Amino acid sequence: MTNRVTYDDGKDGPEHLDEIVTDAGAHLERLDRNRWFLALQRRDGTEICLWIKGKVTMIEEREAPEAEGRR
């Protein structure tokens, strides 16, 4: 991942925050006007994912991908 912050093109009004990605494993993305997705990656590779629409609508914990050669 590469640290970045992007904004929408502002076609429908003022420009808004669209996405934030960090090397530390955080990813916040605007899905539409009132919905957001947030993924936070732990050091072991597992993730906590939140879907937000005015309030958190779903939380998912994802297991770390298996390292090559480990089973």
Image: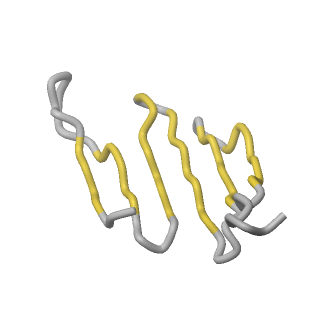
- Along the viewing direction, whichever of 34 and 44 lies nearer the viewer: 44
Tell me the residue at 68%/44% (across/down).
Answer: 56
Q: In what quadrant of the picture does the C terminus appear? A: bottom right
Where 23 falls versus 39 (above or below)?
Answer: below
Q: Residue furthest top?
A: 12
- Along the viewing direction, whichever of 45 and 57 lies nearer the viewer: 45
Tell me the residue at 51%/34% (across/down).
Answer: 35
Where 34 falls versus 45 (above or below)?
Answer: above
Where 49 falls versus 40 (above or below)?
Answer: above
Tell me the residue at 44%/45% (across/down).
Answer: 29
> How is the structure coloured here?
secondary structure
Q: Residue furthest front?
A: 69
Left or right position of 22 against 68: left
Q: How many marks?
A: 0
Tell me the residue at 61%/65% (across/down).
Answer: 41
Left or right position of 11 against 1: left
Q: Residue furthest bottom?
A: 43
Where 30 falls versus 11 (above or below)?
Answer: below
Left or right position of 33 against 47: left
Q: Where is residue 42 drawn, in percent x and y?
A: 65, 71
- Along the viewing direction, whichever of 46 and 59 lies nearer the viewer: 46
Q: Where is residue 60 drawn, in percent x and y?
A: 75, 47
Q: In what quadrant of the picture does the N terminus appear? A: bottom left
Q: Where is residue 19 drawn, in percent x and y?
A: 36, 49
Q: Quadrant of residue 32?
A: top left
